[in-house]
Amino acid sequence: MQLIERRRPNILIYLEALLARTPSFHPAYADVKEKVRTWTAGYAGETWFDRMWLDYTSDENFRVIPDYVTTSHQMDAICVFSKFIAIIEIKNIGGVIEMDGTTRQFTRTLHSESIGMRNPDDQLYRHEKKIRQLTNYKIPVIGIVVFTNPSSILKLKAVERRVVHLSGLPFVLDQLIEQYTTYPSFDVPQLCDLLMAHQCPPAPYQHESIPYPLQTGVFCSACSFSKMVYSRDLWRCLNCSNRQQDAHLLALQDYRLLIGSTISNQEFRRFTEMESRSNAVKILKRCSFETVGTHRSLRYLIPEMDLRNKTK
């Protein structure tokens, strides 16, 4: 089995930066915080799914492609076996989940409040058609809805789709392996190469302009957004005495996500609240970023980073 590494969603990386730079008293703060919570929960469900694969054993050769994206489709995972392809739609939501195969309705009830949500059955129907088209209808394609939240209570009515808790997915896969045992075999690496040829590279999240001032400064990672000062080649927190040499990197990541992908010495000093131009020059040179321009027009190209990723 081979599992391609799953990237964190670009929108989550952006929202985390926006939350860190939005003043807690601003009216937008609660909305941004809720969006971070929602996207974090979704990504957590996907990583639980990935860990399940590390424990799954089978005599069959297979590969898992997470976050499969084409120009028109986005799939949480594709599991390529030699005799079938399974498309996985991952849902990390708790409460009572009701799916109706006749009305095509999908609802979640939590704390006595019911809300309608997009039906994953219909999403998988579209995805199945797409993968069949890409593989020229040569191999069976099966969509499976997987709930990763153990508190989910599933109530299904006239649903023909396979819908399971994460713990039951190995059983379903073993059933499919048995069901398709007499079908012709295909080369798994070749199937993956065929699918990956249509995979779109991850695109940066395109956000609208932010209509309020952002918090500036270099934040301490140890004590909840306390600002640090730079002294004797170290960033120092006056609140908890934490010391870091590279604390500015997270500020540069935030700048890239929220403002722009290049930065000048003056812009760096303004965003990090640093007064010393010579210290800023020293720090930016130490970053070893690519540069454009010379002298006063010199700008540093900030690379993509994901420094808030706690799964690494």
Image: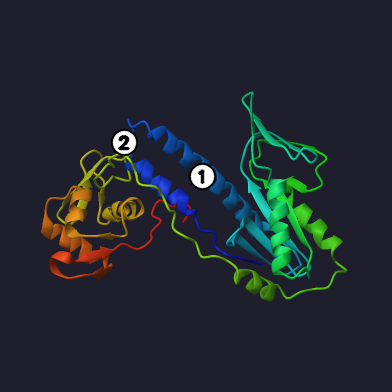
Q: Which mark is residue 152?
A: none
Indicate the quadrant containing the N terminus: top left, top right, bottom left or bottom right: bottom right
The residue located at (32%, 59%) in the rendering is 261
| Residue 88 sits in quarter | bottom right
Asked if the residue at tag 1 contacts the one at tag 2, i.e. Cβ–Cβ closer than 8 Å, the answer is no
| Residue 262 sits in quarter | bottom left
Q: Residue furthest top?
A: 112
Label 1: which secondary element: helix
Q: Nearer the viewer, residue 217 or 258?
A: 258
**Residue under label 2:** 23
Across and down, in percent, residue 203 comes to 47, 60
> Hey, what amino acid is under mark 2?
Pro
Across and down, in percent, residue 174 comes to 79, 58
| Residue 115 sits in quarter | top right
Across and down, in percent, residue 159 comes to 80, 43
The residue located at (35%, 46%) in the rendering is 209
Task: Estimate how packed mark 1 is, as few (under 14), some (14 to 19) or many (20 or more) residues with alpha carbons within 10 Å.
Answer: some
Mark 2 or 1 closer to N-term? Answer: 2
- Let me know if residue 184 appears in the view: yes
Report the Cα–Cα distance between label 2 and label 1: 20 Å
Task: Estimate how packed mark 2 is, as few (under 14), some (14 to 19) or many (20 or more) residues with alpha carbons within 10 Å.
Answer: some
Q: Is residue 91 above or below residue 249?
A: above
- Let me know if residue 310 appears in the view: no
Q: Nearer the viewer, residue 186 or 44?
A: 186
> Hey, what amino acid is under mark 1?
Trp
Label 2: which secondary element: loop
**Residue under label 1:** 39
